[in-house]
Image (cartoon, rainbow, N blue to C red):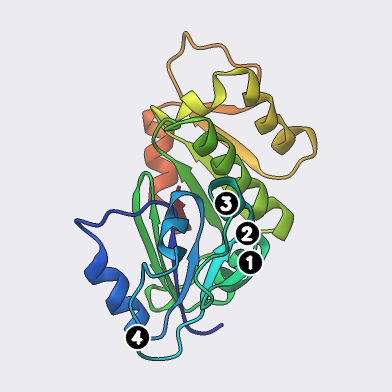
Amino acid sequence: MGGSVLVIRQWSEEDEPGLLHAELAAGATLFLHGDGVVLAEPGRLPELPGASRLEVCAASWRRRYTHAPDPRFRSSSLILMYQALDRAERYRVLGRGGISTWCSATGPAPGWLLEITSPPADARDRAETLEFVLGAAAFGLDARVLIRRPGYNHLLTDTARGWAQLSDFDLLELICELPAERVLEVPVRRVDADAVAALDAVALRRLVL
């Protein structure tokens, strides 16, 4: 284990520049995915002190741009991001559903909980959220996926069958809190608010997407 990792999937100019510069000044590895790749636009980030490692998800970048990113950024993948997270002493993730943090000083964490708490913003976000989860499975992360209301909207379109890969190939357990009247084609373990609270009480490393 070692070092600190900052993952940005969604960026807010109003709220987060101080956090970004503090993390990078402390030498954190920065990984950009989804809409967060805007920070790899040439000229977007000032010259930074220290030896922070800057990485941008190649697939997310190609979906948005045809030109090259800031040359300080290394083209990377979700597999490499999960490798860094698994080794990190601390991490912070800025996702569409909020900020999640973990630090090894808080005690042992036997597994991971990937949480989806908000509906997809658009078709690209829908694809990249699933991509983020499948990256955990490809890396072999010991993880469960919890989809909270209203995040279950990720499972309600024709493209939702992509989530069935998690069950079809026994990759990750998919747990979903959703209204009783909702019928899903995707195999999930349905839970109520009490069961979600029980999951919250378990000390897992969380990634809020």
Residue in front for this viewpoint, 158 or 13: 13
Disc ID at residue 76: 1
| SS at badge 2 | helix
Residue at image coords 39%, 35%: 118
Quadrant of the image containing the N terminus: bottom right
Residue in front for this viewpoint, 48 or 105: 48
| SS at badge 3 | helix
Residue at image coords 44%, 76%: 104
Whichever of callouts 1 and 2 sits on the residue coming sooner in the sequence is 2
Q: Which residue is mark 4?
A: 26
Distance of label 4 from label 3 (alpha carbons): 26 Å
Image quadrant in which you'd find residue 97: top left
Whichever of callouts 4 and 3 sits on the residue coming sooner in the sequence is 4
Give the mark toward the camera: 4 or 2.
2
Disc ID at residue 58: 2
Q: Which residue is mark 3?
A: 60
Give the mark toward the camera: 4 or 3.
3
Give the mark toward the camera: 1 or 4.
1
- Which amino acid type corresponds to the residue marked 3 in the rendered image? Ser
